[in-house]
Amino acid sequence: MTRLSNEQVALRDAVRELADDKIAPRAAEIDQSGEFPWDMVELLAKQDILALPFPAEYGGLAADMISMLVVIEELSRVCATTGLIPAVQELGSLPLLHGGTDEQKQRWIPDLAAGKMLAAFALTEAGAGSDAANARTRATRDGDDWIINGEKRFISQGDVAGLVAVFAVTDTSPEQVNAHRHMTCFYLEKGTPGFSAPRVEHKMGIRGSTTAELAFADARVPDANRVGEVGDGWGLAMKTFERSRPGIGAQAVGIAQGALDVAVKYAGERKQFGKPIGLHQMIGAMLADMATHTEAARQLLWGAAERIEAGDPHAARWASMCKLFAGDTAMAVTTDAVQVLGGYGYTTEYPVERMMRDAKITQLYEGTQQIQRLIIARDLLANL
Amino acid sequence: MNIVVLLKAVPVVGTERLDGSLLTDRSVQLEANGNDEYLLEKALQLTETHGGETILLTVGPAGATEPIRKALAMGAARAVHVVDDAIKGSDMRATLDILAAALRKMEYDLVFAGADTSDGQGGVLGAALAVRLGVPYLSYASEIEPIDGGVRIHRLSPTGYDVLEAPTPAMVMGTQLLGAPRYPSLRGIMQARSKPVEAWSLADLGLAPAAVGGGASTTKTLDTSKPPERAGATFVREPADAAVTQVVDFLAGRRLI
Amino acid sequence: MGAIWAIGELADGAPTKLTLEVATLARTLAEKAGSEAKTVLVGEGAAAAGSAAAAYGPDVLAVEVDGGLADRPLAAVVAPRLAALIEERQPSYVLVGASNDGKDVAGLLLGLTDLPLLANGAGVSWGDGGPRVEMSTFGGKLVTHSAFSEERGMVIVRPASVTAEATAAPGKVETVGVSVAAELPQVRVTDRVEETGAAAPIEEARVIVGAGRGIGSPDGLRVIEDLAEAMGGAVGATRAVVDSGWVPYGQQIGQTGKIVKPALYLACGISGAIQHKVGVQTAGTIVAINKDADAPIAEFADLFVVGDLFEIVPRLAAAIRARKSGSS
C-alpha cells in the first residue's frame, strides 16, 4: 500500500482547504453556466498549482507524479472541471517537456508554469478518435515554415489555450505510416492566422471545461515551433499518455470520493423506518462497496505512478490500468451515490447528479476504456 | 532585519490529553501554537518588506518537526530545533534556561513571542527571556514596525493603545491583532524541504540534563478533573413573542431583572 | 514559612478590582497557612492608595515611584523594585493578578528572581503545606491542580476567580523605600492613544450580552448593543467577531480574551465552542439564543431559546424596558 510522504500530505491538505473554501462554492454555477472558469485558473495560478509539473529551472515546482495526482484528486473532489485544469495544463505541455529543445522550453514554460497561458493537446479528429493514427490534418514544409491544414475535434480547453500541441501528418508514405513515423508535433500559439476554434461542444458533464473544434486553414507556423524531430509525433503522443492517463485517473478518483462523501453524509442523516438509512443493510452494502472501490482505485493509481516514474518498461500498461479502473469506479460510485440519495439525488439540490454526469467522461477521453483494455491485453501478450 | 520567532509545538487542538505523569502528552501529532503563527506572519511580513530572515526557534520533541516544516513552508528561512530526551517534564524555569542558552548562540534584531498558548500558560516567558538576555521587553503588541536602530509597537491598553519604542535587539510579545497567518503556498511547501533545520541538544547548549526535565522541576501537577458541568439547559421553542415572555419570567425568577 | 504577598496594581490612583481580589486571596491563604499576608503596591501614589487596599485585610507595603519614570512601561518600573523587595524580605509566595501589566510583572520577576511560577491560576486554595493552584488547560477541556516542589513560588491569578471581600480588621500601610541596582533595558512610551468606542472593562459588568457569528455583519451588532443598554450591561464578543473587525479586542471573551463572571450572560448567535466556553462557564446564569438547537452552547446554558436572534433580541429588549418602566 502506498503512503504519502509528509510533504505530500502537506500539499494535499493545503489544496483540500483551498478546494473546500474557494472552489466548492463555485462548482454548481460552473456546471450550470457552462462557462470556462477563468477565476479558477487565477486561483490555481496564485497558489502555484499550475507550476507543479514543470522543471524548477523554468519556474516550475518539479513535483513528483503522486503529488500531481493528489492535487488533481482534491480539486476534482469538489469540481471536476477545475480538477481538469491542471491535468490539461500538464497534458498540453508533456510533448514539449519530452521533446522540446531548451530554447523552446525557455520560450514557453515560464508562462505555463505561472498560469499566464494555458496549454491544450490536439490529436483527435472527427474521423480519428480511437484510431488516432488515422489523423488527416497535414503539415507541409514551406521554406522555414510549415503550413497546416485540417481540423481537430473534442480538444479540451482548445479554445481558451494560448498554446496548443497539434499533431499533424508530415509523411503519407505507407512505410512511414506503418512505422508510426508519419506525424510531427507542432506548437501553435493562439492568434496565429489561419488557426481558429470555430465551435465548442454542448456536453453532458464537465460542462465548464470547454471542449473545442479547432480549424487550420493554411495556418503558417515556423519550424522553430516544431517539437521533436519530423516523424516523432506519434511517439511523443504515446509518451504523453503515460503521464496524462493517470491524471485522468486522479480526476476520476476525486469525483468518486466527492460522491462517496456526499452519500455517506446523507445516509448518516436521512432517517427512514426509524433509523439512518446507512444502517439499513442494502444502503450500507452500497456505501461499503463504493468506499472499497474508491480506495482500490487510488492505490492502483499511486502504485502505477511510482512505477511509471521509475521508468518501468510496462509504463503504458500501468497508465492504462489505473485510468481504466478509476474511470469505471467513478461511474459506478457516482451512479450509486445518486441511488443512495434517492429522489433527492436526481435533483440539482445535491451535487451527485452533476458528479454522475461528470464521471462519464473519464470512461471516454484520454483513450476510451475499450482502448485501455486493448493496450493492457497487448502488453500482457507482448512476448508471444 | 533578522527575527527569531519562538514557535511552541503543541498537540493538535482537540487531541490534547495528559500522559501517565500528568504532563501534556507530546507524543501525539503536534502543530504550531496558534498565537505563535500570528507572530510568525508578522515576522514574515517585516522581513519581506525590510529584508533579512525569519528564523524559527522551537524547544520540543521529535514530533515538532511537523509544525517547523509548515512554518518553513510559510516562508521562514531556517529553523533551530532544540531536542533532547532529558528536556521532557521541564518546568517554566528550565524552559527559560534552555531558550536563553539557545538565543545566546543566535544573532537577531528581534525575538517574537506569543501572548497565549494552548495550555493557558502563555505570555510570561518572553518577559523573563528579555531579562536574561539583557534586552528591552515590549508586550501585547497589536502593531510592530522597525524604526531607525530600534522597534516601535502599539501596546494594547484598556482605552486604546500606547506607543512604545526601544532600541534593538529587543524582545516583542504580540497578540492575534497582528493579523491572521497566511496559508503556505505550494511553492512554499516544496521549498521547505530544502531549508535548514539545525537540531541542538542540551550538550550543544552547555546545559546539564540534571538541570532540566521532570527531576529538576519546581512545580508539579497533583491531579486533574473535568470542569464542573452545569445542570442541562431548559429549551424554549415557542414563537418569538411567547419565547420572550418565558425568558423575562425566567430572569425575573432569578432576580436578574 | 515566609509571608504571602499580593502584588497590587493602581489605576487612576486607586487599587484595581483585581488587586482587591488578590489581596483577599492572600489574606485567606495566610490564615490557613498560619503566616502573614501583605499587599504590595508599587507606583505613583502608592501610599495614598494604601488604605483603600488595606481595607481588604493584609498590611500594605507602599513603594512610591519617582514621576520621572512616567514614560516607561509600568511593569518595567514595578518589577525591579519588587525584585529588590523580594530579595530583602524573602516572602514565600507571591500572588500576581493576571492583568496584562500583572503578567508582564510576573514574567519579569521570573527573570529577575529565582521564584518558580505557576501561571493561569483559576483558583488557589491552601493544600498540603502550600498553595494548590487550579488551572484550566487545553482550551477549558481539562482542569489540573498544581503545587510547588519547594515552599516558595509565584502564582498568576485570573480575574474573578476570587470575590474581593473587605475585612473588619483592615491592615496598616507602611511606606517602604527600595533601591534598585539597575533599571531594566530602556523602553519608552512615546504616546498614549485613546480609541473612540473603547468600552468600560467588561470584566466588571454584572450583565454581559455576547455577540457571535450569528449576528452576520457589523450591522447585526446594533440589536446586541440595544439589548445591553436595556439591561444596563456590557457587550462582549467571540473571537470570530473580533477577528472580523466588528468589535474591539478588549471585548473578546474566551480563552484568548477575557474570562468573565457576570451574574447574567446572554449569548446571541454564539455556537459555544470550547474556547469561548472557558470565558463564561462560571457566569451565574447563561441564556443562549441560537437558531441551531444542536449548538454546543446548549451543554452549558441554563436557558436555550431556539430562534432567530433578530426576532428574539429586539423583543426581549423592549420587554425588559417595559418591565423596568412598570408598564408590563
Image: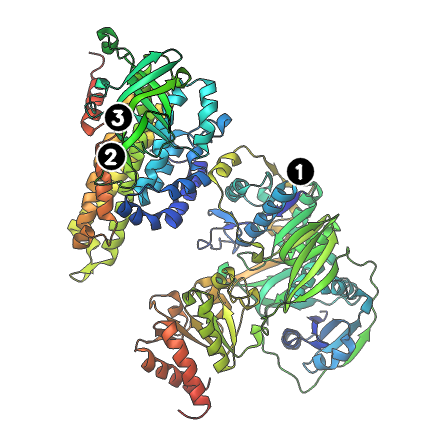
Q: Are marks 2 and 1 in contact (CB under 8 Å)?
A: no
- Label 3 – label 1 distance at C-alpha: 67 Å
Q: Nearer the viewer, residue B31 or B239?
A: B239
Please tell me the numbered disc located at residue A362: 2
Foreground: disc 3 or disc 2:
3
Indicate the chain on which mark 2 is placed.
A
- Quadrant of res A243: top left
Q: Nearer the viewer, residue A143 or A139?
A: A143
Indicate the chain on which mark 3 is placed.
A
Q: Which residue is mark 3?
A: A152
User: Percent position (x, y) of residue A200?
Assistant: 26, 35
Mark 2 secondary-structure assignment: helix
Foreground: disc 3 or disc 1:
3
Q: Which residue is mark 1?
A: B204
Pointer 1 local density, CA inside 10 Å: few below 14, some 14–19, many at least 20 = few
User: Percent position (x, y) of residue A314?
Assistant: 29, 19
**Same chain shared by disc 2 and disc 1:** no
Is A38 placed above or below A244 here? below
